[in-house]
Image (cartoon, helix red, strand yellow):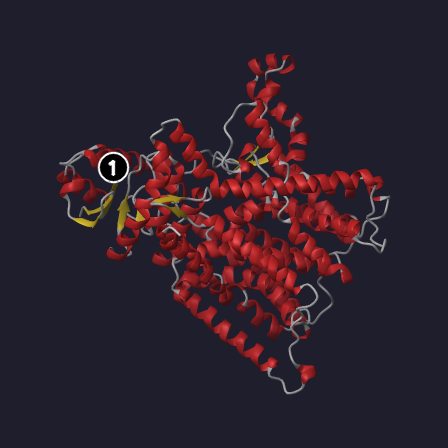
Amino acid sequence: MDSSFLNITGKQLALAGAAIPAFVPALIAPGYVAAWFANFHNFRDRTLVGRLVWSLPISLALSTILSDLLGHFLSLGAVATLFAAATLTAAALVFREAMQSDPAGRLPVGWRPYGTIVAVLGAIWIAVALLSLVDWARHHQLFLSVICQDEGARVNWTGSVVRTGVPPANSLYFFHHAEGLRQYYFWYVLCAAVVQLSRLPVRAVYMASSVWSGFGLAALIGLYLQNFLRAGGRLRRQFVIAICLLSVAGFDLLGVAWITIHLHKGMPLDFAWWARDQITSWMDSLLWVPHHIAGLICCMFSFLLAWIAPQESLRLRAFRVVLMAAAMASGFGLSIFVAFGFFLIMLAWGIWHLATKQGGRPVAVMAISGVAAIVLLSPYLWELTHTPSYLPGGHLFAFTVRQMIPPEGLLSTAVFRHMAGAHPLMARRFANLILLVPGYLLELGFYLVVLLIFLVPSWRRRVPLTQAQRALLFLCIATLPLISFLRSAVLTTNDFGWRAALLLQFPLLLLGAQVVDAWAGRDGRSGLEAPVWIRRLAFLAIAIGLISAEAQLFTLRFGLPELQKHLLALHDPGGEQLSRVPYISITGYTQLNRRIPRSAVVQFNPMEPNMLLGAMDQMYVNRQIAIAGDKSGCGATLGGDPRGCPIMAAAIDALYRGADGAQARRVCRSLGIQVLIARLYDPVWKDGGSWVWTLPPIVAQKDFRALNCR
């Protein structure tokens, strides 16, 4: 095997694999200890597997907000100490019960009958996640995953938490001094605490966090099937079906075929990108945005706890409220978009629940917990309102019409041509409105069939729905107009519409598992039988969704090598750089990070037009960056005074076009930069009298140089 593959890819796989168990102190132990001492939902009477399923979402709810609060008022080391103490306590509790002299009192495992199947599925998920995220080395080339485009900044922010504590500094922008990170950063704090405890590399821990977001989602699915939908004897089978349905996407394959064949556009590197306002597949969300999945877990866990709240002692009621408040607060800090959508949907659900006279207890518990969550979030909310940043536009949200299918074809027809000329914005919105239904058909696929089965009585043989099924159906109906007509206005991407859609996808996943189980069962008691033609349609949709998801994963992993082949065939000089720049950079940055202090401010070429290579720099540098780029606020979007951007961009761009050592030192002193990075492909590299060759080197390699410019 190629030595570069073993040295880079093999090492990344080994470190990320080691980081997976490193999350146990953060995402298992705290919830286990809290639930055991409170005996929450008869925790002590459950099997070990049952306890672990409960421990994961409880830990996510408690650990996330506690990490932020302890990190804010004490230190990140205090968070790591708390996790270590919780781990020792949990291990002692398990050991004591396992060593009971009375066999009847020993802790049962609860492995059978589906333990082996679930373990195999878990191993497959670990392999898929890690192989999708690591860099792929081959013959002195390094092929990044497409996911690096987002992963780069998030790894850098996690490193910022390790270096600067809570609240973290925005490590992508440094104008005279670092400013606080104005973002939902709780996931990075949690990952940083694991780094502090395990001493593993930041990127390895962040990759492992994607694996744990999948584990958390699986635990939430199991809890909902058992305690919300009351699956009973069908629990384990429906759980396995739901886990398998996570690999079913919508009809993204058909959408990609439409834009490439009919609209003559290039094939996107992520199949979800065929639509401007995507509904991201489960696999895509787990790999790209594990923090949004974690936010979903926390929000929906709080809803589950409100729904199943029994008559219990005052102590347990207080514990429930605290746990729900922690889950809501954590959900907000993990994903503001999911949490804001959840808040609006809960308002609608509360009104509907009271109007239909289903009892006021769940609504009251949700309301009280929401108020307590605001109290827990008060330090973080103060930060958000007192941190400067570059935010284009004056509003966080805007009303519009979701765009999935590109409307250009409809706008070019005779019916729309006149309107498009006189009122282009109105015409585009009207076209998007017409295309909403076919857009949701393509984006949801099988899950749209599930929604219609529960909406149309004749499609389910007019069998009445249970109260829990009606509640899930209501969440779907309430989410659809929200994500169809409200979008985030801060960035060009509609992050709210993309991520709040998870609140639609999760109920449909649960209902879909019930539907498939009903059709696969042989006892005829499911109550969800449907006409044969609907079953055939649904299974066809599942098949297309599976192919779409597999093609999407393949493109995320191997899309860049194929793109490089295409560019090289066209004699495009950018083709070689796609794999060459990451290879020379990873070796150079590895040496650099060993030789400079953690407080150093570093600058690479900010004029890089390729977003993926720019993200690669952010991921590898693991230090404070002066500016992340020379456009769009220079990185001040999430913290910092944007007035410095044009000044810094002009000065640093001039350095990389060509400047001597004296000029480089003047710029570095004025901007607080200590290290300049240069590579073979930077224009300044070719100037033999430039700072690249006259400043003292910290790292000097054939194609990579890091220079001390103080």
User: Residue 276: percent from the left, percent from the top?
Assistant: 55, 32
Please name the amino acid that badge 1 sits on. Answer: Ile
Residue at the front extreme? 1
Task: Please say whether residue 354 is visible from this viewpoint.
Answer: no
The image shows residue 239, relative to residue 430, as above or below, that is below
Residue 245 position (above or below residue 79): above
Q: Which residue is mark 1?
A: 652
| Foreground pick, 362 / 593 | 593
**Which image quarter: residue 101?**
bottom right
User: What residue do we see at 74% from left, 56% from top?
Assistant: 229
Counting labels gives 1
Instruction: Say whether residue 680 is visible.
Output: yes
Question: Residue 709: x percent and y percent?
Answer: 18, 46
Q: Looking at the rendering, which quadrant does residue 148 occupy? A: top left
Toward the bottom, the furthest residue is 101
To which quarter of the image does residue 75 belong?
Answer: bottom left
Q: Nearer the viewer, residue 644 or 370?
A: 644
Q: Position of residue 576 (x, y in %)?
A: 35, 35
Element at label 1: helix
- Residue 617 percent across, percent down from the top left: 34, 44
Q: Is residue 530 left or right of residue 86?
A: right
On screen, residue 10 versus residue 627, left or right, reads right
Query: How dense is the environment of label 1, judged by Cα within 10 Å: few (below 14), some, or many (20 and up)?
Result: many
Q: Looking at the picture, does residue 69 appear above or below residue 183?
A: below
